[in-house]
Amino acid sequence: MKIRRALFKIFGPVILAALLVVAVLIIPFASSGFNHQTIERAAVSQSKNVFKGVAVKRQALTENYVPFMGSSELSRMDSFHPSVLAQHYHRDYRPFLLGVAGSQSLAHYWGMQGINHELQNKKAVMIVSPQWFVKQGQNPIAFMQYHSNLQTVTWLLQATNNRDDRYAARRLLDMQVDKADSRLDLMVKKIADGKQLSKADRTYLQLEKNSLANQDRWFSTLSMKNRTDRINKAAGQLPSSPYNVKRLDAIAYEMGDKATTNNQFRVSNKFWNKRLKGNYRKLKGEQKNFNYVQSPEFADFQLVLNQFHKDNMDVMFVIPPVNKRWSQYTGLSMAMLRQFDRKINYQLRSQGFTNIVDLSNDGGEDFFMQDTIHLGWRGWLKVDQHVAPFLEGKYQQPHYQMNDYFYSKQWQDMANSQLNHYLAKN
């Protein structure tokens, strides 16, 4: 008896602590929510943990935040960035920035898992970069930076044997660079093969979801970048008078002119010094064989469109241009870019996605671009002239006609005369 008591004194606290940790991880945790300052920081942080998580996004979407989905262009926070203009002119919405370099359609699809209820009957803005649509499509290493087991587990619990889920499962397996959780991989493979999950699978998934969701609530906002000072500083350069496009365009022109003085391509001085000054001569003609018309990204994009349809979302799409001076120097084909533009527009419009801001012909406008491919001063201002009235207006019930043909290899690879013939015919 004495031995048992002695052992309990030694090991009891350890065992109890371990049981407590397990209980806390497994039992669903009722959170009081995040405060206003945390949500405000998260909205502009572009934190990977926030992107991969659920809790912060859920709360933000129940308030006045709107998803702005994209990639690296969202990081270009000059005075005309959507987050700056929305704050400075006291809009009744705030952008919640989702995405950074490397986040493409597939990452955005998985990033929507777990927040679909909050996205129902809501608006969103998606910036669709031509550079996503390269031959290999989504880079697996980049994808895994924005993917989490919480996304997978949440999705598996509602996955069924339909075209979207089978495609999503196959593409997730394609992206796996680390087989650390083989049990989840096996369940994803079941969905890819059109099989059902067992009761044991679902029990495991529910326990795992509880644990991961609790960790998300506790840890997703740790080490989050604080860009609110950057937003405030950029806003401080704008006039406090009522929003006036003509006056703001003049200010954007002046800002762009002052910021692009040390190079022939009129990209920002900082970008030139950091990225191009030492090697731009080597890049002359280097993009002449680039192709954004044939890519698996078109099918991944269709997966996102189908999710928008399921969530009954009203979405505005922005198609940015490339810097014309730079594309002429590197040999990037204008004919190829026009084909891409026609192809992506057809995929959208033919299915009822008609809110499109197509800026593909504006790459030669002065100070429209901040660098070679990212929107800058006057570019962001033009985007705002479309986005602001869209987001401040009433939600419009969309009427989509989804077409699974856009998942096909034939559509992914269609280009040149075949594409021209197909678009003319349809």
Image (cartoon, rainbow, N blue to C red):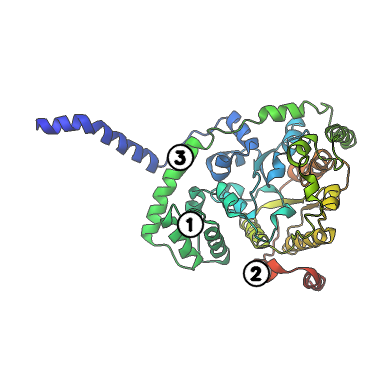
- Which amino acid lies under the numbered mark 3 shown in the image of this protein? Gln
Residue 82: in sight, yes or no? yes
Residue 112: in sight, yes or no? no
- Which amino acid lies under the numbered mark 1 shown in the image of this protein? Leu
Which residue is depicted at the point 77% across and 60% down? 289
Of the image marks 3 and 2, the number of the one nearer the N terminus = 3
Element class at badge 2: loop
**As drawn, 155 above or below 412:** above
Which residue is depicted at the point 42% across and 44% down? 211
Mark carried by residue 408? 2
Which residue is depicted at the point 50% across and 63% down? 160
Give the crowd class for mark 3: few <14, some 14-19, many >=20 residues within 10 Å. Answer: some
Considering depth in this image, is 351 or 149 the residue closer to the camera? 149
Quadrant position of residue 15: top left
- Which amino acid lies under the numbered mark 2 shown in the image of this protein? Ser
Residue 237 at x, y = what percent? 80, 27
Residue 313 at x, y = what percent? 66, 52
Element class at badge 1: helix
Of the image marks 1 and 3, the number of the one nearer the N terminus = 1
Element class at badge 3: helix
Quadrant position of residue 287: bottom right
Residue 239 at x, y = what percent? 83, 27
Left or right position of 232 against 14: right
Of the image marks 1 and 2, the number of the one nearer the N terminus = 1
Query: Which residue corresponds to mark 3?
Result: 215
Query: Which residue corresponds to mark 1?
Result: 156
